[in-house]
Amino acid sequence: MTRHQSKYQGRFLSTLFLFSFFGITAVHAQEQKINAFVSTLHEQKLFNGSLMIAEKDRVLFQGQTGQSNAGTQEEISSRSQFPIASVTKTFTATAILQLKAKGLLDLDQPVKKYLPEFPYGNVTIRHLLSNTSGLSQYYSLFDQEIEADGNRVITNQDIIPVLKQKNIPPSFTPGDRWEYNNVNFCLAALIVEKVSGKTFHNYMNTFVFRPSGMKDTFVPVDRRVKSKSQVQLYGYPNLYSTALKNVDSLPLPFKIEGHSNFYGNGGIVSTAADLIKFNLALQSGKLLPKKELAEAFNPTILNNGKTVSYKLDEKEVSYGLGWEMYTDTTHGKVVFHDGSLSGLTSILIYNLSTKQAIVMLDNTGSNAVFASVNALMELLGNRAYVIPGKNLPREYANAVVKGDIHKGNDFIRNYESNPSSFRSSERDFIRVGYDLLRNNLIKESLTVFDTASKLYPESWNVYDSFGEALLKAGDKPKAQEMYQKSIKLNPENKNAVEILQKLQKI
């Protein structure tokens, strides 16, 4: 063990000893397991941040590991503040439901009733909170405005005017489908302001942060300006890199990223301890009546009568009103919301049956956070758990790009003999393959897709993606072969059918 690793492990042990002294932790054996769990994550470079676990009003674990700023060597502390990204949506939903409980709005009334200039008459507040509105995404919505004025900052107030001006039709009838969309919660924040007569910032301070005792949480007036205690974020420049960079030095994926100051969808800055306080206040009835809270945790039913369902890191989940939930309730009803930015991953998860809550905040954008909290939930329930391993597609592709195919193949062999040694999914392999393709690393992309097709021979999507990469490489016969395999596995793959028809005409 290196001196660096020992230092952080010691911090966790010291923290645990302190809480044990005051008698507010779980049994010592469980403490040791959690400590070993987090220490292993940090040593594997899968966690750099703050973690807090509570049961009812009792703290089971609180610890931090790593640096808040690599330049100044400052370590993360219990007061270190993190942007919580989309975990903010639970706060916006809370505000809307508070106003509903007071009789000041109706979730099933059109948004247009509260925001008269809103151009879509059949979108309701419920559609916004459940992500079933069908509204346009904002990623490229303001490109023309930004090109016309490079100094312009886009805010929530700009959304409705541009939707009206560009007359963009919904991508589907509201309530027909579920589609994650930040615009929904930006509009919900505008409704909070219109109905309450307060700015979103002031509303949160008055009706959520203060009642919950959250002293280290705020809504930034300008998200580009950081507080003194706010952590610096570090991310990967691409999906096949293993070297973290300060996100301020990385290119922005969309023009809007450097020109927006949205709120309601994200933006809140907080600490792990404050998020635990928020959850406790919420669950104890301090912020919402039981009726409204239960409504937030109910899976959304679409117009066709089906329940919203989708996969998150290979786990089936649903969406309520600003909250996600596991569809499997074998070990209790579990609700949560996660969030991510370049260099940031956040999650607040709560088991309504066991009253156990976990908050995990990471300033390196670790994609192991969701798998980690799932494993921690198993640990708390005294069930078998597996500490997440490194991301196989990233590690493998990195070795391929560096020309060390032998090292890459060793990763694959280790995974095949011991699947818990890495985390892997066909989705992640496909994303890495496309990232290589976008960066014109065609040969490396083909290697990654070829390996993915061997690891996931029953995946029609892998073969479809492999075919696309082969076409870009100019290998039409091999591309046809991959598309045919894809169609055999999934006859409904219209994309592959259409491409094959075009290729046969050439």
Image (cartoon, grey):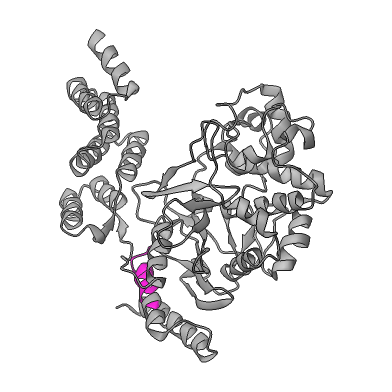
**For the view shown, which residue lies furthest in the top direction?**
505
Tag count: 0
Q: Quadrant of the N terminus?
A: bottom left
Can residue 225 be spotted in the picture? no
In the image: residue 397, left or right of residue 218:
left
**Does 110 sit left or right of 74 as displayed?**
right
Determine the main secondary structure of the stretch shown in magenta.
helix
Residue 427 x, y percent position in the rendering: 34, 42
x and y percentages locating residue 435 in the rendered image? 36, 39
Q: Residue furthest bottom?
A: 21
Q: Residue at x 41, y 54 (%)?
A: 328
Quarter of the view holding residue 463: top left
Q: Residue at x 62, y 68 (%)?
A: 280
The quadrant in which the C terminus is found is: top left
Magenta span includes 37: yes
- Is residue 438 in view from this perspective? yes
Q: Is residue 256 magenta?
A: no
Q: In which quadrant of the rendered view does residue 136 lie?
A: top right
Residue 132, percent from left and from top = 57, 36
Which segment is the magenta one?
Answer: 35-46
The residue most toward the right is 197
- Say whether residue 293 is left or right of residue 100: left
- 333 relative to 485 in the view: left or right: right
Give whichever of 131, 347 is nearer the camera.
131
Residue 116 to residue 131: above or below: above
Residue 148 point in image, percent of width and height: 67, 28
